[in-house]
Amino acid sequence: MATTKPKVDVVIVGMGWTGSILAKELTDAGLHVVALERGADRDTQPDFAYPKVVDELEGSVHRKYLQSLAQDTITIRHNTGQTAVPYRQMGSFKPGTGVGGAGSHWSGCHFRALPEDFNFRSNIEQRYGRGFIPQDMTIQDFPVSYEELEPHFDHFEYVCGTSGKAGVINGVLQEGGNPFEGSRSREYALPPNPNYLGAELFYGAAREMGWHPYPIPASNTSRAYTNPYGCQMGPCNACGFCSDYGCLNYSKASPNACILPVLRQRELFELRTHAQVLKVDLDSTGRKATGVTYLDAQGREVRQPADLVLLCAFSYINVHLMLVSGIGTPYDPQTGEGTIGKNYSYQNLNRVVLFFDKDVQANGFIGIGGAGTTIDDLNGNQLDNAEAGFVGGGIIWARQPGAGPVRGINVPPGTPAWGSAWKRAAADAFRHSFYYEVQGACMSYKQSYLSLDPTYKDAFGRPLLRMTFDWHDNEIRASQYLVDKAQQMSRILNPIAMSGDAKKDGTHYDITKYQSTHTCGGAIMGANPKDSALNRYLQSWDVPNVFAIGSNAFPQNNGYNPTGMVGALAYWAAKAIVDQYLKDPGPLVQA
């Protein structure tokens, strides 16, 4: 029999970026907040302390900081004619676990979406006509604008100590920044990080192509910093252990370093770890949440009543909880009816690897997760999609998050896969090569969605979440176009060898190969309940005291990393809850 805890104002599921942001803002408003995290408690000390955190075998192979797929995973198939199979080993993406979630093991790339990313479908239709969009492509406009989110983009960047160079401040172009970005209210919190060799060379090659390179906005601090909450950060020492790892130096922004030191001191905040939330509890009408049911660290079933339920877990876990809890109508790809699970999208990622003679010292083992150089000349409205032949855009960037022997060594094309010849090539290439990545947008489609699996269950008896996803011709053409542009630029640098991995015609999505953790959609925000799960404040249309906050709300994914957008939306939702919902609980947007 379940134990019932005393009722609280708010229960938060997941303690990554969004959970931490909402807990901070709502305890500021005087609410009693209980946060439930399925994993262990984690903090810089002792969990990310040197030297134990810089262990490639433990971090990149044994996946210490990631979700245990033996207990809870998803199933995956390319189309509805296939039987989905479970995701057994970390490959394509890396959902986190423990306090900080994926926000503790991310790289630090911290972009804002472009203004035209918000009215995405309307913009494409206006520029090229409705017929330019494939019939099965289900892209939508966001129900919120760049101008509305700008203050929240700004605040999140200052919480994170983001290092970068503004391109447009209050409508005025700034030298050295991104001339195509949306206007911002002020400069970044910190100046850019120093460049590595590949980024320095990128500047010259990109300019020769007629492009406009600028520093990648990076939440890896370029100098000592104290954020608006009083949390202190140290300058990044370029150790090369960002992706897959927590930061040992208080240099990479994370919930652990930037928000939790404040939250942990608050009487109105209670953190419960090893708390596996099973479902959101609904009343007899199915229109109101009464709290959540979870298993505690001893495996006992517990009910936590609350007035407000905030789903702040990893994107597709938010969708899974909505499906198993009966919140909203599951999406049906045959009829197009239903909204929960609709518009799943991902990220279109490829790379070009350049190899040089030994007089070029690239030193790939040195790295700063988010730092480097990029361009927006092939992104947003800068790209002529009619000429390019696809919907969406992307960026080419020079980024060096750090390499090591366990994480993989690039070797020139034609090198044997093993033996003495491979060893010689690895030794020759390790310090004399670097790569440029191509990161493209990923559109949403009628056939790409999330649902409950009819066959497989998790360790708690719930149906696993089933992902139906494959690459479409649009994304394959985008990959080929963008990689070709990256190779044109790279040839300017005269490498002795070069390899590119553009997707070939007919390529299928490969779950075994890491691509990015940028999973999006499934419970999207929109202007009406017929084609979206959430309103403009990320509030459930169907159960108004439930909010689902994360990249699950994206109707499609743009060319950038989603974290900056996710943080801004979290602050946007928190403001709506405090300023509007608490004064008059109920729907914030009338259907």
Image (cartoon, helix red, strand yellow):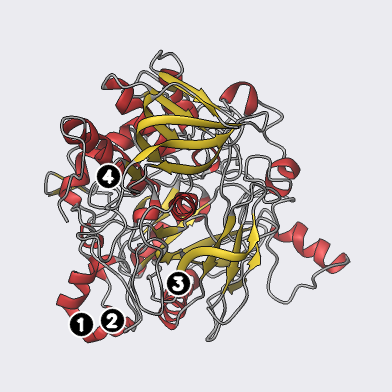
Q: Is residue 591 left or right of residue 495?
A: left
Q: Quick one: label 4 or label 1, which is nearer the N terminus?
A: 1
Mark pair 3, 1: CA separation = 21 Å
The type of residue carrying mark 4 is Pro
| Residue lying at the far left of the rendered structure | 171
- For marks 3 and 2, give the one nearer the viewer: 3
Q: Which residue is mark 3?
A: 448
Q: Are marks 2 and 4 in contact (CB under 8 Å)?
A: no
Q: Which residue is mark 1?
A: 130
Q: Residue at x 29, y 61 (%)?
A: 532
Residue 406: % across, % down: 74, 50
Q: Is residue 78 left or right of residue 370?
A: right
Q: Which residue is mark 4?
A: 544
Q: Are marks 2 and 1 in contact (CB under 8 Å)?
A: yes
The type of residue carrying mark 2 is Ile
Mark pair 4, 1: CA separation = 34 Å
